[in-house]
Amino acid sequence: MMKFFRNKIAAIILGVPVFFMASCTEEETQQLIDLAISIFASMLGYDPNGENWEDTDDELDGDDVTSTSKSWEQYCPPVGNQGEYGTCVAWATSYGLKTTLNMIDGTWSTSNKNSSSYQCSPVDLWHSMRSNYSSEVSKGCGGSSFDPAFKAMQNKGVATLSNVPFNNQKMTCDGVSGKGLSSNKITTYRTVAYSADMSTDGKAYGMTVNNIKAHLEKGPLVIGARLGEKFMSWNSSAVITNDTKDYKGQHAYHAMMLVGFDDNRKAFRIQNSWGKNSWGDEGMIWVGYNFFINQFCFGVWSASNTASSSAAPRKTTGNDISVKVISDTEQNMDGDRTVKYTITNNGANPINTKDYSIIYLLFQARNLSQKQILFDNEKNMTLESGQSITVEKHYNIPVSVKAGNYYTALIANPYDEMEDDNQANNFSYMTGKNMASFYVTGGRLFNNSNGTSIVSSIVDKDHANAYRNSEVQNSLIRMKKAK
């Protein structure tokens, strides 16, 4: 039923002449367009949590661009279709970028690019990065980030589609480990550019036409983009130069592969993962330079199969600390509270707790600027690799805290003092049931009447009270720099 409905919607919004078109009123047609947009919106799945925006490739200038156009399309696999799953990162990085790199390097022959034996499996990468490199305890095929995807391809490799297929009908998303393939790894990956709202200092890096063109001359890239209504319903080989709406929240973000540019069009060429027949210019799109730089794109990444690539290997430290709240209870009517939590060293190196901060933060729902640090960790002990300790801490909420709805967050390394290879597991939030906020007044925190929840991410489905981990951490880094 869903397949039929999608085909019907696609036929309407993409201008295919069908017999029922004339029977639709303008209002009915708009309703179908809106529904089509909502369907495509479910086929996203980029989550900015856990990205390392600071570890960048060299920024290149206009002198490095030697041509007026570049295309890697001849090396790309056929346009894929991720279906009703938020797996765009896996499609962009494995099926798209890794397959294309193998074709460019000659590891695989372009004569075989239509064969599943010579296409990297997004399903395999999805399972590898979820089970090994992501701390998000999410159910179903929700969002993911580029860092876990690249780490999985770098350390474990990715199987082919013939070994781990995707039939577009049913996909198991939880509790499965990726197979990987030791002979099919990347060696390097780097951040090429990011927008100001993703950085810790509020400044963009490398987000210029010349920088991205110069990197594209060396090879294809992957991007994170914000999608609007025009993009969702695009069906043209023309250049998209603006959009009607900039969606907000986790499901606003989408990952795709950047495969070329053309100065005559003043546009970048992008391969999507929504199929060849139901969207875009046979599954591709041209995005105008100015629109791409100023609104559409928020992050660009490069990767390579070879250590001699201009993209230097992303450094790893062997450090990985995680924290988790166990409980937070009120001890008496004066507002005295006790929070119990664990600190775990998941990394390979011994780490002393004095080398980084652990804070407990109270921050207001819908107003992150209203925040209060409730306590700093005062432990001074070394945790060996694999060791975990449990800590109890007493605290009070200051009576000066403005009455309102709040969340609490336990955060390890909040100011990015320690080079932590996996920052995604540095957060543990306490909320009411179903991500409901707490009410604070007169120095007391009132739990949700239905109980409390401890979660690793506070991104809720409606995004009404949602904050990404990166938003919380960046807010704290800016606060520290301002002191």
Image (tube, rainbow, N blue to C red):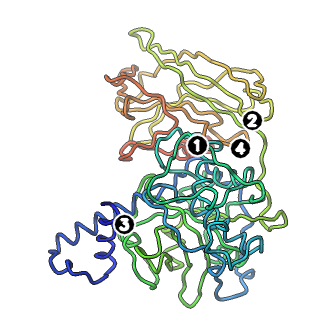
User: Camera-side residue: 38 or 78?
Assistant: 78
- Quadrant into which the N terminus falls: bottom left
Q: Are marks 2 and 4 in contact (CB under 8 Å)?
A: yes
The residue tagged 3 is 245
Q: Nearer the viewer, mark 3 or mark 1?
A: 1
**Element class at badge 2:** loop
Query: Which residue bears the numbered disc 1?
Result: 176
Q: In front here: 105 or 300?
A: 105
* Distance in Å between CA atoms under marks 3 and 4: 35 Å
SS of the residue at dot 1? Answer: loop
Q: Quadrant of residue 196?
A: bottom right
N-terminal-most mark, 1 or 2: 1
Q: Residue at x 57, y 17 (%)?
A: 393
| Three-letter code, disc 2 | Gly
Q: CA distance from mark 1 to mark 4?
A: 23 Å
**50 relative position to 305: left or right:** left
N-terminal label among 1 and 4: 1
Instruction: Tell me if mark 3 has few (under 14), some (14-19) or many (20+) residues whose alpha carbon lies within 10 angstroms of its own.
Output: few
**Residue at 58% of width from left, 33% of height from top?**
411
Q: Nearer the viewer, residue 68 or 367?
A: 68
Please tell me the numbered disc located at residue 26: none
The three-letter amino acid code for the residue at tag 3 is Lys
